[in-house]
Amino acid sequence: MKFTLSWLKDHLETEADVHQIAEAMTMAGLEVEEVLDPAAKLAPFTVARIISAERHPNADRLQVCQVETVDGMKEIVCGAPNARAGLTTIYAPIGAYVPGLGVTLVEKPVRGVVSNGMLCSASELELADESDGIQELPPEIPVGTPVAGLFGAEPVIDFEVTPNRPDWLGVAGIARDLAAAGVGKLKHFDIAVVRGGFPSPISVRLDAPEMCPVFAGRVIRGVKNGPSPAWLQKRLTAIGLRPINRLVDVTNLIAYDRARPLHVYDLAKLSGTEIVVRGGQVSAGTAHIEGGEPEHLIALDGKTYAVSAADCVIADAGGERPIGLGGVMGGESTGCDDDTTDVFLESAWFDPLVIAQTGRALGIHSDAQYRFARGVDPVSVTPGLELATRLILDLCGGEPSEIVFVGEPPAGPAPFAFDPAYVKRLSGMDLPTDRIGTILGQLGFLVQAAPAGQAEPWIVTPPSWRRDVEGRADLVEEVARIEGFDRLPDTPLPEVARPAGGVLSPRQARVRTARRALAALGYAEAVTWSFTKQSTAALFGGGDERLVLENPIAADLDCMRPSALPNLIQAAARNAARGFADAALFEIGPIYLGDDPGDQRTVVAGLVAPHAARHWAGAGEDALFALKADLTAVLEEIGAPVASLQLVQGQNRDWWHPGRSARLQLGPKNVMVEFGELHPRVLKALDADAPMLAFEIVLDAVPEPRGQKGKNGSGKARGTADLSAFMPLTRDFAFVVEEAKPVGDLIRAAAGADKALIADVRVFDVYRGKGVDEGFKSVALEVVIQPREATLAEAEIEALTAKVVAAVEKQGGRLRA
């Protein structure tokens, strides 16, 4: 919504400038978007007079002019056909920005002659759409006069109208709020009744009162249409509206001045003597069109619209021919032009919901639709008609008929009880009762004393244009914004004791810890949808019909995901398609194994796509073991019992490579992690290149550590370092075990032989070949022994060695000779 300062002053007596008005509007709750000042754009331009004009020596269509300017005599090259000696025009100096051309003037030669400025047309200054030459001004205007003052350029305020305040869509409504805020004094105008000289030859019938409860109109004959006067064109142009003709411009003026949309029909183009307001109609069904064909309307914008039964239609010819969409846009068939002499002027009230739905369904966003969809004041039907009649008679002449009025306007807002003390209770503002009553009265509310014996002293009735006010809290808001939100008391909230511990739950702390750990390991976090394609979900054990969405946001996101891996695979594939094949991604989020709330799990998923550039040294460390190392680091960070985990191979689900994947578990019923290489079949189905390796940690399966929580909620508080004063020693063992035996079982058995002395167990060799039977392997372990109390004697070391061998033999290992 836009308006100029002079337009506002038609309704408000004020000495405030445009910036003070904008500030007052902001403090009163109106969201000012911008203050446009065309005078600032025109500031460099002044009046000049051409003293002489001679043909350019190197160009037949250019003239070299000697120009008297505010900066003295200037030689300026000009190509306008009307440039001549004695012409008073507009001068732009070097350095001026010409808005119509989008250029800043610089001193440079034009075909060999330096031009010391520019002589401007109206279109180059955006004062007109087109120009035939440079602007011609009256000769009596003195040289050096600022151009901004000549063309009456004035600031324009542009602000956003909230949906609950349709009264702000008229300048009169803005003036009312500013007057209440103390910016000026509201001017009250009585709209004079224009008496009709004859009965209206056009009658109105309401066949859809639920869409249009009330309709008023009158005929004005003998009008003379044509271009509007300069003051009206200037007012409309200033806010971005294109003047059309006097009849249409009057309706646009009242729409922006009083928030009252109107429409004018050319009486000669109407068929019959009756206008019918009805819903859209559908023709009888045919063999080709099931249910019939909707009627069509060619609107004033030149487009054809198919009208449905939910749309309000204005029709003539006994209700058969649509001539407009009620409250939205008129039809081309009855539009007014310069030949129009007799008109029918419409002023009606349309249901906001109907108009809003029509605008959305048909994609029409006219000024009328914008206002009716938010709710026009129903009491303005007749006053708006009278005001438009007076303006048309003043500008176009003519003779009006009596008003035809059909229907009943909707009931006004209901009154309710209000206690002015509620203002302090709700807002903290301690205002006198008289001040509260004055603010409400200036805003149009009717404040009356309540009947004796009632608890609250006032009965307040909102005005017809404030249907958004429904209770006492709304009145407090009105008082607070007019008094000024900056006057709200700033009472600090009472101090609240901080909790002794952190505010994160153990799971939240683990999520944060896992995120930091993976980022430190070089993984990039991906944030993907919790949905995937049903066929993709089926590849990962999902795709259950119970998890298919009824209203998906996209066709390929129609199912809740059973795993975070498919989204990570597709993300890595997209990176590879753009030249970044060597990816390391992770995501922490939910997966869905069923439609019960208990079937939701939180997982930490990581994925690597080892596609590093080729190098003479080879591929380097096996990516699978590198992935396992990363996985182990994350598990240790979140406090998982890594030492107690069992590594199981051959039991992973179908999307894992059967020979290069495993799971970590705390028993058959608590599978905590699955990791390894993804199956090439699954990668091919997702258009991703192998190899890709991944892991998926089910956070819900990670048991909480016992004892006191640390700062991150993931385990016991870390104590002091337990460092021994004695040097550690190592012993090497080689055990022969079956090929299928997990090495991790041997490590755990050796480490558990004496937990007090054995600090670490590491695998340093795996051998298959000569000396080892087929189906077996030799695993070499390095056992780190850390004495605590004293240096170990040889007998103590031998005894510990025997414990290690015995523990590993229980796992099927045999000490290799």
Image (spheres, grey):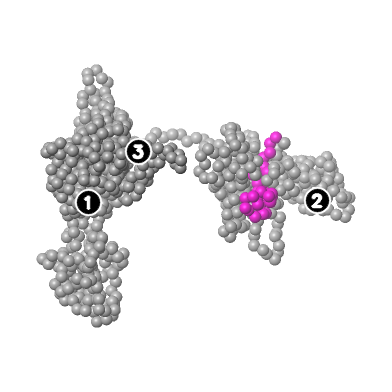
Give above or below for 669 relative to 729. above
Q: Are discs 3 and 2 less than 8 Å apart at CB?
A: no
The amino acid marked with disc number 2 is Ala
Magenta residue check for 340: no
Lower position in the chain sequence, tag 3 or tag 2: 3
The residue pinned by badge 2 equals 780
Q: Which mark is residue 337?
A: 1
Mark 3 vs mark 2, CA separation in Å: 88 Å
Mark 3 element type: loop
Give above or below for 461 relative to 295. above
**Whole-percent x and y of residue 311?**
35, 38
Dot 2, how many residues are within 10 Å of its Cα: few (below 14), some (14-19), or many (20+)?
many
Mark 1 vs mark 2, CA separation in Å: 100 Å
- Tell me where residue 166 sits by quadrant: top left
Mark 1 element type: loop
| Mark 3 or mark 2, whichever is nearer to me | 3
Q: Which residue occupies the foreground of this view, 271 or 817? A: 271
The amino acid marked with disc number 1 is Asp
Look at the image and give the residue range highlighted in magenta: 669-697
Q: Which residue is depicted at the point 15% across and 70% down?
A: 87
Q: Which residue is depicted at the point 81% across and 41% down?
A: 811
The residue pinned by badge 3 equals 280
* Residue furthest front in the image: 287
Q: In the drawing, does residue 458 fall left or right of residue 736? A: left
The amino acid marked with disc number 3 is Gly
**Whole-percent x and y of residue 572?**
60, 53
Dot 1, how many residues are within 10 Å of its Cα: few (below 14), some (14-19), or many (20+)?
some
Mark 3 vs mark 1, CA separation in Å: 27 Å
